[in-house]
Image (cartoon, rainbow, N blue to C red):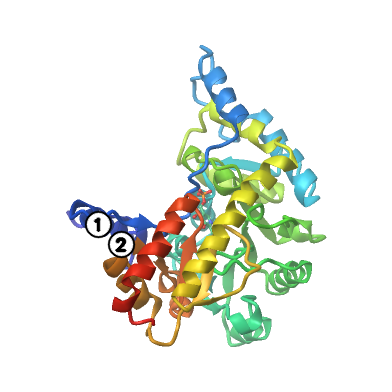
Amino acid sequence: MQTSKRLEGIGEYYFSQKLREIDELNKQGKNVINLGIGSPDLPPHADVVKTLQEESAKPNVHAYQSYKGSPVLRKAISDWYKKWYDVELNPETEILPLLGSKEGIMHICMTYLDAGDKVLVPNPGYPTYRSAVKLAGGGCVDYDLTEANNWEPDFNALDKLVAAGGTFKLMWINYPQMPTGQLPSAALFEKIVAFGKKHNILICHDNPYSFILNDAPASILHVPGAKEIAVELNSLSKSHNMAGWRVGVLSGAKERIDEVLRFKSNMDSGMFLPAQLAAAKALQLPKSWYDEVNVIYKKRRQKVFELLDLLQCVYDKSQAGMFVWAKIPSNYKTGYELSDEVLYGTGVFITPGGIFGKAGDGYIRVSLCSPEERFAESIERIKEFKPALKVK
Ligand SMILES: Cc1ncc(COP(=O)(O)O)c(C=O)c1O
């Protein structure tokens, strides 16, 4: 069957393809350790699961729900934003619960882009920004993030792009940055908001990692006047170990929420109410919840540092989020080469940085979403097979 033109240039998602390859290796008895994908292996808080169980046992919770989400969940999101980010959001008008933030990326692109509209996307960055822009008919213009510039946009270069005739409808940003783990400074968010206002570009901040290995969660909406030009996506996938539940949120000015809802209400028919009520419970968890999860990630991260030392990779120890981003040694041309050598030589899968854009070619990314023993086993395998690897 002939697929639509909009699918041209949209490949299968890298991980879905790679997981097939890993399945094949497993069938050959390789027992691959997958340190690729960022899907939390830890469970949500027991009270969250209990709320889902209790609520779903009730007879009157199974109908379609409001397109705008349950008032209980919207209020919980508003309180959570106030408590953790010191941001005021009107629960009636400035919050739109989502089935995960990934769908929000698509909804935003479908809401604002016409054929040919240009969008600034980070390189390296989450590949979904790129595919959502293309699917919506827009064109991506990369802005490079470099280690030398702390993985922040180069605003002089951006101003030049605009001065050279570039008109951009949207700009995707994401801090703590994935894949580099770079934390945002307050000054960075201020500069981004000012850039958006100066050129009338809607700033779309994607913020799913602010609670992981980070003691100071920050929202771009904290910048005074940010709502005039910025919206923010957030998610319970990583912060509350609820990736499979599909709960996220879009926050911003009432007008933006109404605009995105015009598109979204034609796509789905709301979320299962017990999942929304359980998500509200999750958002009320005390600081100890985040602390306990982070103790585990910290221990795992130590192991990952050990593994990366073995591979002679160089990394920053103060990264946030659930990955470690590391520069590969010069014996390898790209992270793809190192990743494949380690996968086929030792049965350990780590993500090549190039999947996040050309600027990631010289890097790899290791996920923290596996038990400590799996990292220990990966280290043993790499030690055992190291004589066969290019890195000595
Ligand atoms: C930067 C970034 N944004 C968004 C998402 C999607 O998260 P969600 O589960 O909320 O759709 C991910 C997931 O890996 C991510 O890394």
Q: Amino acid at mark 1?
A: Lys
Displayed quadrant of residue 213: bottom right
Name the residue located 45 percent from the left edge and 64 percent from the top edge. Answer: 127
Residue 95 in the image, given as x and y percentages of width and height: 67, 42
Residue closest to the eye, 35 or 80? 35
Query: Which of the pair 202/183 is nearer the observer?
Result: 183
Q: Which residue is mark 1?
A: 30
Up the image or down, 178 lies above or below 259; here it is: below
The quadrant of the picture occupied by the C terminus is bottom left
Q: Secondary structure at mark 1?
A: loop
Q: Which residue is mark 2?
A: 347
The numbered dot on residue 329 is none
67 vs 380, nearest the viewer:
380
Q: Position of residue 299 (x, y in %)?
A: 59, 55
Q: Is residue 119 visible?
A: no
The kind of residue tagged 2 is: Gly
**Labels 1 & 2 near each other (Cβ < 8 A):** yes
